[in-house]
Image (cartoon, rainbow, N blue to C red):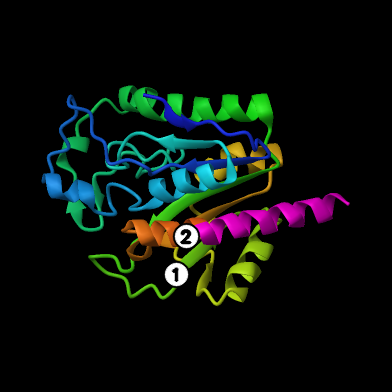
């Protein structure tokens, strides 16, 4: 299974959404209750709608994952222990314990990232934005997360600093490598952006803000303005 590709004319920008789907193929039994597939452990709630809406607004291409992160987490390195999770936020995933890991990796991870690699090789965007969402509070452990949005990045801060400053300037509580650190969890952008010298950030939106159409529309508005700002930043740096 490869990826959902949304075509767009504005090929200076590529949008990514690793955790866009909660789909579990019929031949895979995770051994969990169906209701868990609607939770943040299975999908980045609202992220796909934001990514598609932003792609339409900006006429930008987007590449979205087509499988639940409980089947295989597309935003993990091949050797990451949680690539195929045995548990997530206190929920056991018994169907992932005794499986052919290589077969599942080749079935889902390889084609998804091959799609991204081919697109970048053919067009080389000026920048990449990866859209994610996070839960306001983990069900098992952790504390309330006060940020409405977080900007995640690893070594390259070309877009991170301007994005954080701009979002905070709009009065939005914005996490700087929060609620997760891109220094630790940045697999997709490390591989497809930083490795090629392409400026990028991951944008994490708190999922209670994008659970309905109105919230999605609001964040499409916000992020379209942010994307325009980042284009200006890059143009200024290019001189």
Mark closer to the observer (2, 1): 2
Q: What is the quadrant of residue 8 in the picture? A: top right
Could you tell me which residue is drawn at 44 percent across and 24 percent down?
111
Could you tell me which residue is drawn at 59 percent across and 27 percent down?
119
Q: Is residue 29 positioned above or below 168 on the image?
A: above
Q: Tell me the quadrant of the picture where the N terminus can be found.
A: top left
> Which residue reaches farthest right?
239
Q: Kindly state the secondary structure of the residue where label 2 is placed.
A: helix
- Neighbour tally class for label 2: few under 14, some 14-19, many 20 plus, Cα within 10 Å: some
Main secondary structure of the magenta stretch: helix
Q: Foreground: 152 or 140?
A: 152
Q: Is residue 61 positioned above or below 236 on the image?
A: above
x, y percent for residue 60: 58, 40
Q: Is residue 205 visible?
A: yes
Q: Which residues are magenta?
A: 221-239
Q: Foreground: 172 or 85?
A: 172
């Amino acid at each position: 299974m490869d990826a959902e590709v949304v075509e767009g004319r504005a090929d200076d920008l590529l949008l990514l959404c690793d955790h866009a789907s909660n789909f579990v193929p019929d031949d895979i039994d995770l051994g969990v209750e169906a209701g868990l597939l609607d939770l943040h452990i299975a999908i980045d709630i609202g992220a796909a709608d934001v990514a598609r809406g932003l792609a339409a607004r900006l006429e930008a291409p987007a590449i979205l994952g087509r499988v639940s992160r409980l089947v295989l987490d597309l935003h993990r390195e091949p050797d990451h222990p949680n690539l195929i999770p045995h548990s997530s936020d206190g929920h056991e995933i018994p169907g992932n314990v005794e499986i052919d890991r290589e077969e599942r990796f080749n079935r889902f991870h390889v084609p998804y990232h091959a799609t991204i690699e081919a697109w970048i090789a053919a067009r080389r965007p000026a920048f990449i934005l990866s859209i994610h969402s996070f839960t306001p509070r983990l069900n098992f452990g952790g504390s309330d997360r006060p940020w409405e949005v977080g900007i995640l990045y690893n070594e390259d801060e070309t877009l991170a600093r301007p994005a954080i400053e701009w979002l905070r300037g709009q009065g939005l509580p914005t996490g700087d490598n929060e609620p997760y650190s891109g220094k630790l969890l940045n697999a997709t952008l490390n591989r497809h952006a930083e490795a090629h010298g392409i400026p990028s950030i991951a944008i994490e939106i708190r999922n209670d803000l994008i659970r309905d159409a109105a919230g999605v529309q609001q964040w499409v508005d916000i992020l379209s303005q942010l994307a325009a700002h980042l284009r200006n930043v890059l143009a200024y740096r290019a001189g």
